[in-house]
Amino acid sequence: MRKILVTGGTGYIGSHTVVELQKSGFEPVIIDNLSNSNAKIVDLIARITGRKPLFEKLDMCDLPALQSFFEKHDDIAGVIHFAAYKAVGESVNNPLKYYRNNIVSLLNLLQCMEMLQHKNLVFSSSCTVYGQPDNLPVTELAPVKPAISPYGNTKQIAEEIIRDTVSQQDIMAISLRYFNPIGAHESGLIGELPLGVPDNLVPYITQTAIGKREKLTVFGNDYDTHDGTCIRDYIYVSDLAKAHVVALNRMLDEKNEQSHEIFNVGTGTGYSVLDAINSFEKTTGVNLNWAFSDRRPGDVEQVWADTTLANLKLGWKAEKDLDVMMATAWKWEQTLATGIMEAGG
Ligand code: UFG
């Protein structure tokens, strides 16, 4: 079984990707510093797949620790790099924390990958690099716009670092630009674990529905969209996870056409905030307490993906619709309410 390193593998997208890797016959090995995740996820992954992935608590900013990890695992056939801070607002207040963590960890990883025989990297990028695109749906050829937040800037800088490094270091890389990942594994055993008050729409919806939050605030009703609220391309987290496996296989099979390729990963359809609320209410039968407020600073009005490149070159297509995404997100919130993540749960 080919060994794949998953950095940030106990996190939201990472854990779903570990499941898909195991299902595809790979042996994922997780490193994570647990700064925004929980080691219990490793056991929950085992409950889903019947196999417990290897896990080591490790901070990738600690270069000697990362080097000794790579020395032990020099048979790694590919790396999927998720480990990063991701809270947009926090990055504005504490830019150095974001630059240090997200950039230094990538530099250390690229340095350590020199030791590997198989230097294949899948990088977790974001549609945030497009800002508000001039044309929709947005293709990979659209210009990268000045980043609105230090978080977004770390994604842009990381893509540049990878682009410059691959040509010099014999590394193959695919950057996946995610749109808005939501939902949870259909088992209801793993999902998003926001720290504190959620920034993102769907965890806020499910926490409001379960009674952890009093009311959902919808940021802005005067955008130039069909109902005045912002539009996003919501992508089911397990569909996104599968895109990583496909990207990895593309490099392992030496099918990639350039040493650094970039793909949009979305559904190709945009939904408004009110569409998302309606879908949640319809699929779960739960009425949501919500109200409009002012726009949230920094929000892009509307963005959705042109997924032609991923469809054609990766042979990958998103499968699940918004209702499935909402139903699984709700199932996961109900699992959390059982206390599964608490001690002894
Ligand atoms: N929203 C609300 N109320 C909330 C939370 C969100 O109305 O309580 C709205 C936002 O205004 C936006 C939409 O729901 O219109 C989606 O917001 P999210 O915060 O869920 O997602 P964003 O599109 O703002 O951000 C996501 C990722 C970022 C990434 C960005 C790229 O979380 O990591 O996409 O566009 F940078």
Image: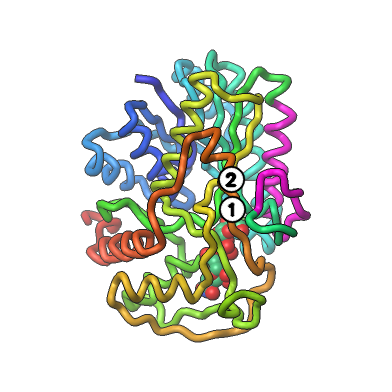
- Report whether residue 264 is seen: yes
* Residue 157 is covered by the magenta coloring: yes
Rendered view: 61 above or below 322: above
CA gap between label 1 and label 2 equals: 6 Å
- Residue under label 1: 305
Ligand 1 closer than 8 Å to label 1 CB:
no
| Secondary element at tag 1 | loop
The residue shown at (63%, 38%) is 262
- Mark 1 and mark 2 lie on one chain; the one further toward the N terminus is 2
Question: What colour scheme governs how the chains and residues are painted in the rendered image of this protein?
Answer: rainbow
Q: Quadrant of residue 325?
A: bottom left
Rendered view: 149 above or below 297: above
* Residue 110 is covered by the magenta coloring: no
Rendered view: 35 above or below 246: below
The residue shown at (33%, 78%) is 211
Question: Percent from the top left, x then y, of residue 321?
Answer: 40, 58
- Report whether residue 11 is seen: no
Segment colored magenta: 138-165
Amino acid identity at mark 1: Ala
Quarter of the picture containing the C terminus is bottom left
Question: Percent from the top left, x then y, of residue 3?
Answer: 40, 23
Quarter of the picture containing the N terminus is top left
Relative depth, front residue between 59 and 77:
77
Relative depth, front residue between 252 and 191:
252
* Mark 2 neighbour class, 10 Å CA radius: few under 14, some 14 to 19, many 20 or more: many
- Residue under label 2: 264
Q: Residue furthest top?
A: 117
| Secondary element at tag 2 | strand
Asked if disc 1 and disc 2 are in contact, CB closer than 8 Å, the reply is: yes
Question: Percent from the top left, x then y, of residue 241?
Answer: 43, 43
Question: Percent from the top left, x then y, of residue 121?
Answer: 56, 29
Amino acid identity at mark 2: Asn
